[in-house]
Image (cartoon, rainbow, N blue to C red):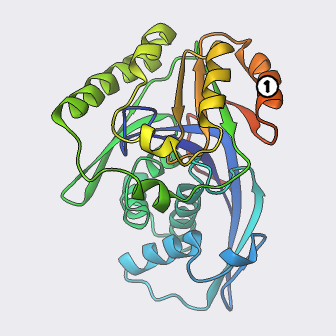
Amino acid sequence: MIVRVPASSANLGPGFDSFGIAWQLYNEISFQLSDETEILGCAEGYQNEENLALRAYRRVLERCGIREEGGVSIRFGKTSIPVSRGLGSSAALITAGVMAANELYGLGLSRDELFLLATEVEGHPDNVAPALYGGLSVSAMAGGRAVTRRFPVSDKLFFTALIPPFELSTALARSVLPESVSRADAVFNVSRGALVLRALGDGDAELLAFAMDDRIHQSYRATLIDGFSAARIEAQECGAAAICISGAGPTLLCVSGNPDFPARMETALSLALPGWEMRTLTPDLDGAKIAAL
């Protein structure tokens, strides 16, 4: 069987560890019951027991009290989500693993139950929520339990990812953040987060230009992204209404109300930051699917 999972961008400026949106950019991973466990089609460094797809697969079996007989063959097929670039590659693996275990063992778990199990493995719900459900989501943790809800995204907005030619680990991106923030900064993010949701739903690029700002994480993480300032300046000059770091980075997400923005940005990026890649993104509204049995 093959599981297809979308990429995702978390945070979206002020929505730190809460907001997330899924994209029509997919990884396809096949799972098949086997005599012994093997992982194929990915870098050798990921072909081990720590592979997140395998860990998530086994977490489901463990929580359901099932003893694994034999193993599972996991094969990476089409993998369009770049690794460690802030586009939800880890969440995609985890989502694929929980869905595969549910399907192969006929467990009948609901998508909500799979969401809770995926969050256990990931540690936070901001990427696994859009990966599983699709669309724009807002998630929160309460007593170790994740809660998520979807919000609309207008088709009047155009999304573009600026992807650097280097990785940035989530652990490193978290290590530079302060342990606490001021009340003023907390209020700043909460108020703008609410406006971001309204702007995305209404397709209001002008409101988004004001609201997609942050005082909790982006200024710290920007220091880890070589070329951040140059990319941001180029995006602004090309007409981006709003720019934020996608997830933990290093990818930058640009939002515009102008359909011509991607073409202008591609030309500017190739001149200003050789090696960076630009991808136009369209929201995925369906989430992860069993693509083939």
- Identify the image quadrant of residue 169: bottom right
Above or below, comparing residue 183 to residue 287 in the picture:
above
166 w.r.t. 99: above or below: above
Q: Residue at x 64, y 12 (%)?
A: 239
User: In the rendered image, is residue 112 in sight?
Assistant: yes
Which residue is rendered at x = 25% and y = 57% of the image?
145
Q: Residue at x 37, y 65 (%)?
A: 120
**Residue 126 image position (x, y, % from top left):** 41, 47
The quadrant of the rendering that contains the N terminus is bottom right
Q: Amino acid at mark 1?
A: Glu
Measured as percent of width and height from the top left, residue 281 is found at 67, 31
Answer above or below: position of 21 versus 62: above
Q: Is residue 37 above or below residue 101?
A: below
Helix, strand or loop for disc 1: helix
Instruction: Indicate the position of residue 79 as horizontal and vertical percent values.
Output: 74, 55
Query: Would residue 193 appear left or right of 234 to someone viewing this image?
Result: left
**Disc 1: which residue:** 266
**Picture quarter containing residue 292?**
bottom right
Question: Seen in the image, is 16 located left or right of residue 128?
Answer: left
Measuring from the top left, give residue 103's x and y in whole percent.
56, 66
Q: In the drawing, does residue 110 fall left or right of residue 36?
A: left
Answer yes or no: is residue 292 visible. Answer: no
Q: Nearer the viewer, residue 7 or 82?
A: 82
